[in-house]
Structure formats: C-alpha cells, structure tokens
Image (spheres, helix red, strand yellow):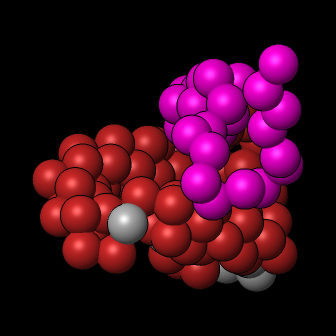
Amino acid sequence: MKTTRFLDRTTPPHIATLILMAGLSALTMNIFLPSLPGMAAWFDAPYALMQLSVSLYLGLSAVLQILIGPISDRFGRRRTMIGALLLFLLATLGTLLAPTVESFLIFRMC
C-alpha cells in the first residue's frame, strides 16, 4: 500500500485538488453575477459599468489562457499555480476593501 504525503512535491496532485482548481473560476463568476445590482448601488455606479467587470474578466481570462502556458513551462506548474492563487487571494481582498468602483475594477481584473 503506497502512502502519499501531504504537500510532497514528488507526488502528482490529487484529483480533488485538480477539480477544485478547475471549478474556482466558475464558482467566483457564479457568486459574483447575482450581486451586480447590489454592487452598483453600493458604489453608486451605473449598472453598465458594473457589467463591464464581467466582460473584462472574461476577456482577460481568454488572454491569460494563451500566456499561462509558456509561463508554466518556464517556471513549472506548481510554482505558477501557487503564484496565481496568491494573486487571486490578494485581488479578492482588494475587491472586498475597494473604496471606489475604479479600484474595484482594477482588483477584479487581477
């Protein structure tokens, strides 16, 4: 019986880890979309401006799909994923604490 060690770099990732990472983007979008009207009211911004955050997010996701492959080839998948998760967490904190709609959009695009 083979045992795997938690956070061992020599073992492949667990299937649950891969599923959670793949679903994270869809989860954040599904949580984000219903709150658009409330965020527009909170920031006192036009609803169309808040909808721009969806379009920009999807556009940047498409561009990043092209760029992330060479980055992960250069630095390794593990390092790239950890860096991306750290950026995601910092951007999430930024969106939660954003005082203006402009700063919210900047952090949302991160």
The magenta segment is: 1-29
The residue lying furthest to the top in this view is 1
- Report the side of 24 relative to 64 (left or right): right
Q: Nearer the viewer, residue 36 or 66?
A: 66
Q: Percent x, y for residue 67?
A: 19, 62
Q: Where residue 15 appears, x then y in whole percent?
A: 63, 23
**Left or right, residue 69 beside residue 9:** left
Q: Is residue 45 visible?
A: no
Residue nearer the viewer, 77 or 84: 77
Residue 28 lies within the magenta run: yes
Please tell me which residue lies in front, 85 or 42.
85
| Residue at the image point whose x is 78% and y is 26% from the top | 2
> Is residue 22 visible to the viewer in this orientation of the structure?
yes
The quarter of the picture where residue 99 lies is bottom right
Instruction: Give the residue at x 52% y 50%.
Output: 50
Q: Nearer the viewer, residue 94 or 69?
A: 69
Give above or below for 30 relative to 41. above
At x 63%, y 59%, the residue is 9
Check the image and report above or below for 35 versus 43: above
The mark tally for this picture is 0
In this rendering, position of residue 98 left or right of residue 12: right
Q: Furthest-front residue in view?
A: 1
Q: Quadrant of the N terminus?
A: top right
Tell me if residue 18 comes above or below residue 67 in the rendering. above
Where residue 11 sits in the image (x, y, percent)?
Answer: 62, 45
Residue 10, by quadrant, is bottom right
Residue 103 at x, y = what percent? 59, 80
Is residue 20 part of the magenta span, yes or no?
yes
